[in-house]
Amino acid sequence: MGNLLFPLAVFFAAIFTNNILLTNYLGMCSFLSVSKELETSAGLGIAVTFVMAVTTALNWLAYEYLLVPFNLEYLRFIVFIIVIAAFVQLIEMIIERYSEGLYFSLGIFLPLITVNCAILGASLFMVIREYSFMTSFFFGLGSGLGWLMAIMAMAGIRVRLKTAKIPYGLEGAGIALIIAGFMAMAFMGFNGMITIS
Amino acid sequence: MKSQSFYAKRINPIIFMVAVTVVCILLTAALHLSTLELVQENERFFLWRSVLDAGGITHEGTPASVNDLYKKYVTQEDNHYLIKTDDGVTRFVFATEGPGLWGIISIMVGFEDDLKTLSGVSIVSQNETPGLGARIEEPWFTAQFVGKQGPFRLVEEGTSSMADEIDAITGATRTSESFRNIMNRLKVEDGNSVGRN
Amino acid sequence: MAKSKLKKTFLDPLGKDNPVFVQILGICSTLAVTNKLDNTMVMVLGVMFTTALSSWTLSIMRKWIPSRIRMMVETMVIATYVIIVDIALKAYYPEMWKQLGPYVGLIITNCIVMGRVEAFALQNKPFLSLVDGLASGMGYAYVLLIIAFFRELLGTGTLWGYQILGSWWTSWAIMIMPPGGFFMLAIFIWVVREAFIKEENNG
């Protein structure tokens, strides 16, 4: 029984059957506001994926080697947030230093990512489900890719809706939520594709 | 002059952040430690209540009643709980767990003397979807196991008739399947050993 | 003069400037917990508590926070209040705590809390910020409770766990699942915008 099989199952589950946005509702705010354009959605999605993958791994290490040995699990909220905020701050400084272009296009997203509930949520789920290091990393990566996929799909649909007539009450957030609802239903069709047992 | 502003720009924020962090951690730690005993009592209450439920012993649901009955009828052995009622009935309760949809589902499973017929099942902890998977905690779900024998098969909610059929929860297919898997994996050899497939 | 500002600070988040259906904040938790009324109640009380006190605390600190680490400090203070809620629930309402799972922790990243701090508390006096935080929490609360009312009723036929609709009602299970949450919120926003805000804009 490959040690790699479970992390891979979790990886695919995080993208399709347990999509962090469409099944667990995390990361909605930036999802609803940014998904109007394809390019910005892609940019944000990639940034989220990167941060999610790395911070899940870092937080796992912090949890296992810092919090658990000293019985400080209840401090995990504080520690995880510090790790995420510090990491994003670090990335921002690196990008600012080495790539003007990237900073210009991606820079505004970085503060948005710090407060993206999906990123903190991924780390919290990893703790609740007691994932191993490998699994946590793949879970973070998969969750990020799932989020990216959802926001890209949403952007694709919304771009097409630009020329459609939408009732005043539904403009903006309303129609985005309805689209998200249908997407969530569609993703429910993936149920059972992957069973983790 | 210039070095002073350098100092202020880089170091001050760090000092401020550390100060705020320390205050927050102290507050949190203080609250945590002051409620620690209460939390542990709650956890023990849940555990003992589950053992009694799985062992088919009725109680009033209050901590007092649970504590009394537990101390009266239950002895904790190596890997199981031994129950001897006033009527001379012996039951064995085993703790087992497995992955659910969102996290680990921990349950207590009680067997009659023959180690095949179930005396009860009780959920110790679960993290499933509220209103759907979390319904495994509802009395009707766990009660249906009483008197039945594994390995179990899932049938549509409300249609079970045979001794190895279990009603699934409508809309919570995967949690139901996970639960069935946990139940079927529990392997009881004799009163002293338990293994998992 | 001050009194009317107080009144405005309190009333705006309840209607005109509602965090959920006008500012579109705090959506994650809106969707996640509104499939049962009792979960929702605990969640909104937690958010009200956190938003009010975080706004108040950060408003007091506002003159000393270095701008570079502003967000980290905000998050730290908010996180601490949330942990207080978490520990309190765990100790005094353990059954409820078990049900809310990771969502209590997610009050931290609930955009409403952070949003109010950034938009109001950092530029206003403590007491006013407290009122704003409280009102924002209340604005959030009633929206969620209404949505939860419909989702639980239509989804399981119960209200607060008590069976209301008899067995003649086939539950719309979709209501308590993720898509139901999205649709209910969209409908809510639609109704409110058509009925109230459109009038205001036209009149």
Image (cartoon, grey):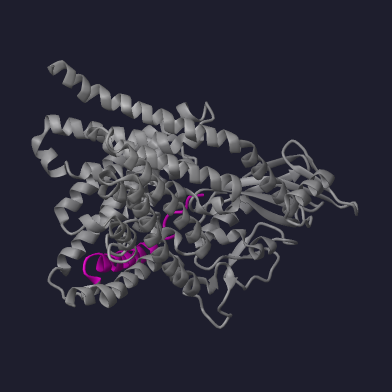
Q: Can you tell which quarter of the image residue B178 is in?
A: bottom right
Can you see residue A105?
Answer: yes
Image height check: is A44 above or below A182? above
On screen, residue C191 above or below C55: below
Along the line of sight, the residue nearer the viewer: B101 or C177? C177
Query: Observer-nearest residue: B125 or A71?
Result: A71
Percent from the top left, x then y, of residue B93? 74, 47
Q: Is residue A123 visible?
A: no
Q: Residue furthest bottom?
A: C168
The question of residue A196 being in magenta is answered with yes
The picture quadrant where one finds residue A179 is: bottom left
Residue B45, position in %: x, y? 69, 46
Quadrant for the C terminus of chain B in the image: top right
Per the rendered image, the range of residues in magenta is A170-197
Above/below status of A82 relative to B170: above
Horizontal and vertical percent for residue C154?
47, 74
> How many numbered circles are shown?
0
Q: Residue furthest left?
A: A101
> Position of A114 compared to A65: left or right?
left
Q: Which residue appears farthest toward the right when viewing the image? A: B87
Q: Find residue B48 and report its horizontal and vertical position in percent.
A: 72, 46
Residue B98 falls within the magenta-colored stretch: no
Majority secondary structure of magenta residues: helix
Name which residue lies at 53% across and 33% down. Answer: B30
Question: A165 or B16: which is nearer to us?
Answer: B16
For the N terminus of chain B, the image quarter is top left
Residue in the picture at 33% in, 73% down: C187
